[in-house]
Amino acid sequence: MTYTAVELIELKRDGGALPFDAIAWLIDSYTQGTVPDYQMAAMLMAIFHQGLNDAELGAWTEAMLHSGETLDLSDIDLPKVDKHSTGGVGDKVSIPLAPIVAACGVAVPMMSGRGLGHTGGTLDKLESIPGYTTALDPDRFRSILSEHGLVLAGQSEVMVPADREIYSLRDATATVPSIPLIASSIMSKKLAEDLDGLLLDVKQGSGAFMEDLQEARRLAKTMVGIGSNHGVAVVAFITSMDQPLGREVGNANEIRESLDVLRGQGPADLTELTLTFAEAMLELGGVPGGRERVEEAVESGAALEKFRDLVSAHGGDVAVVDEPKNLPEAGYEERIVAPRAGHVHRCDARTIGTASTRLGAGRQRKEDAVDHAVGITLLAKIGDRVAEGDALATVAFNDPALFESQRDRLASAWLIEDDPVQAPILVVERIS
């Protein structure tokens, strides 16, 4: 049958089910450029409101997966396990995690993404390292993985091109928090990597796209099911994102904090989540040793050396590993201070992430450039006691007018009360 984009948009807008071949036609036509951005944007909004049933989701994921080439990593004689997060604020886990896991004997072919909405992106963070190239063709991707046991890159021009375009369009059209669009985006990329196992970090809370626990659980189960249908072992963790992870939000400053983790000096929450995920990835890869082996990779310096190798292989300046001051630095810095004494009850991830994006650390339009030097350093998080006038955060920026436009927004992220309060539980649930 022949289709038009308009009739398919109408069908989904009105709650109908898209035929399998219609989905294949739509994804292919958009990838080839015959369906324009504005029509795909309308379809994404229709899906955002109407969803996709199981058959549609399977067809949509398959069409995305086969919109370009897939990897064949059968010549790499190591278990191949990747990790993906649904997006959070201050979530730089992938950056220290991959070298830790690779140092333990598991190959990590990580295909990452850019920032979406108020959340940061692994590629944007890595590109704050001078010279680091995230755009690799499949041969170079395989070569780095074969030589070093890990690679952290974006989608090449020929791998899952439909997702690359739709991913950017979702960011600019307010259609990010949709379970079928999130699930198909993540799983199409991951299934293209020829994996043995996959760990998923499904964020839940005020700073996540899934604020509701039931929705986060539904997303996790959806992706575990897609993996099972394709013969890939998948473990999903639901983790808290009511406040930012770690102490840094931005790009270059999150690289600095990732280096702290690799040196065994990272903040407790970020370190614990990274090591928990590393242990689970070894389990998925069938590699023994568990937490003890993971901790040894950090303590011995082996994980830090893997990161150094990674940066070099991607063309980056390895001097940043020893001298993080070589990363971009902003021209201005201001403090957000506590209006009263007490205990921090709220350090709202979404508010902080939105302010970071509007200061230039993320994108408001798909074509926007990212200012890698913009960053927010959190000095008080939930459970901390502060005195009146104490700094809650320091903000590094290059545009004073932008900072003034976000000053009040940032200040509103913190709520200080008299009574003590416990920090949120980090790992909410494990699903497999």
Image (tube, grey):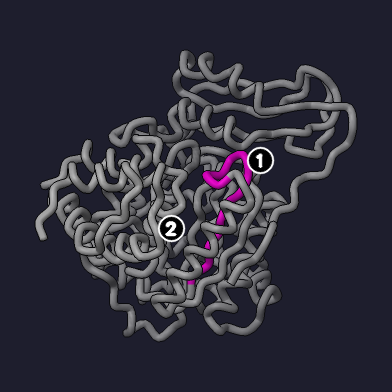
Nearer to me, 267 or 419: 419
Is 128 located above or below residue 179 in the figure? above
Q: Earlier in the sequence, mark 1 or mark 2?
A: 2
Residue 102 disc label: none
Q: Rounded to the nearest whole Å, what is the CA distance between mark 1 and mark 2?
A: 23 Å
Neighbour tally class for label 1: few under 14, some 14-19, many 20 plus, Cα within 10 Å:
many
Is 206 located above or below residue 312 in the figure? above
Assign the N terminus to one quadrant of the image.
bottom left
Q: What span is in magenta?
A: 198-210
- At horizontal 51% and vertical 38% (from top left) the residue drawn is 250
Q: Amino acid at mark 2?
A: Ala
Res. 313 visible in picture: no
What residue sits right under mark 1 in the picture? 243
Q: Amino acid at mark 1?
A: Gln
Q: Nearer the viewer, mark 1 or mark 2?
A: 2
Taking the image as shown, residue 412 lies to the left or right of residue 149, namely right
What residue sits right under mark 2 in the picture? 183
Nearer to me, 92 or 2: 2
Res. 428 visible in picture: yes
* Image coords of residue 243 (percent x, y): 66, 40
Residue extending farthest right:
419
Is 217 located above or below residue 226 in the figure? above
* Image coords of residue 9 (percent x, y): 25, 44
Taking the image as shown, residue 27 lies to the left or right of residue 394, namely left
* Image coords of residue 96 (percent x, y): 55, 58
Q: Is residue 313 magenta?
A: no
